[in-house]
Image (tube, rainbow, N blue to C red):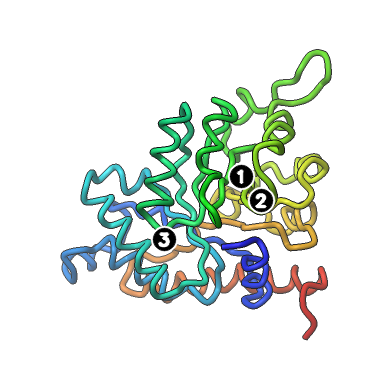
Amino acid sequence: MTKQELFENIKRKKSFLCVGLDTDVEKIPEHLFDLSDDPIFEFNKAIIDATADLCVAYKPNLAFYESLGIEGWEILERTVDYIRSTYPDQFIIADAKRGDIGNTSAMYARTFFGNMEFDSVTVAPYMGEDSVTPFLTYEGKWVTLLALTSNKGAYDFQFMKDEKTGERLFEKVLKTSLTWGTDENMMYVVGATKAEMLTDIRAIVPEHFLLVPGVGAQGGSLQEVAKFGLNSTCGLLVNSSRQIIYASSEADFASVARVEAQKVQQEMEVILSHAGFFIE
């Protein structure tokens, strides 16, 4: 998917919502185990069907699937295939946080882009350019590079300053990575709980898309993210996982998930309208 296609989807759906498919076998409604031999996929399918018109992206977190062994990988593949065949306008992100020496990263890239139909994969930049560029060799695919995360441990390293320049580590990551890819094939993870940093981030990467987790259950503010993060092509994919997919543990889980997703989408519609992205 191209950047322009993603932007057109955002304007058409009046949404920049990404739904995180962090599907935990211990949290899905119990009745699914009685109804299906494939309860996790059935949960994913119901969530997707209930939210597809309200979001522009899905982000399966691979840890929840890898923890189930080969069965989990098969569920992940069925989930991605279902999205791709039923809702082909969706941008699908593998939240895998890969990144290794070049030949290993090339195998990771083959996994997600050659053998599975993901549009993007999250990549850790710590090992440098040769650990990232193999993912950028696939036309129409994206790297989503970790820049400034929403977790408490972000302060352990990401805010460390260069003694000579005062440059923080996350700023170094942004500036250095600009030589690896473009705003047509690279976006950045920036946690919603660090929304006050978006002004500094936009000073470095004004045209790139940002994948923003941390809104909802983690306490991030959508209004703050939009205030500091919007650009001329929206430039934001705001992820919400638990707040939507686990809004109910009963038989009505999909319809309740839709209600929660719609609340976010309606807030996004107002934000986009005020920013002038479409005229009613």
Kindly state the secondary structure of the residue where label 1 is placed: strand
- Bin the neighbour count of mark 1 within 10 Å (Cα to Cα): few under 14, some 14-19, many 20 and up: many
Q: Quadrant of the C terminus?
A: bottom right
- Work out which quarter of the rendered image holds the N terminus and state it: bottom right
Residue 112 at what x, y percent from top left? 41, 49
Which residue is label 2 attached to?
210
Horizontally, residue 214 falls left or right of residue 42, namely: right
Q: Look at discs 3 and 1 and give the one toward the viewer.
A: 1
Callout 2 crowding tier (Cα within 10 Å): few <14, some 14–19, many ≥20: many
Of residues 37 and 109, the one drawn nearer to the viewer in this rendering: 109
* Residue 120 at x, y percent in the picture: 51, 52
Q: Position of residue 178 (x, y in %)?
A: 71, 38
The numbered disc on residue 189 is 1
Residue 192 drawn above or below residue 33: above
Q: Relative to 270, is 193 above or below?
A: above
- The numbered disc on residue 16 is none
Q: Nearer the viewer, residue 153 or 63?
A: 63
Label 3 packing within 10 angstroms: few (<14), some (14-19), many (20+): many
- Asked if marks 2 and 1 touch (Cβ < 8 Å), the reply is yes
Q: Earlier in the sequence, mark 2 or mark 3?
A: 2
Disc 2 marks which amino acid? Answer: Leu
Disc 3 secondary structure class: loop
Kindly identify the residue that appears in the image at 16 percent across and 68 percent down.
34
- On the image, numbered disc 3 is attached to which residue? 246
Mark toward the start of the polypeptide (3 vs 1) = 1
- Amino acid type assigned to the residue bearing label 3 in the image: Tyr
Amino acid of disc 1: Val
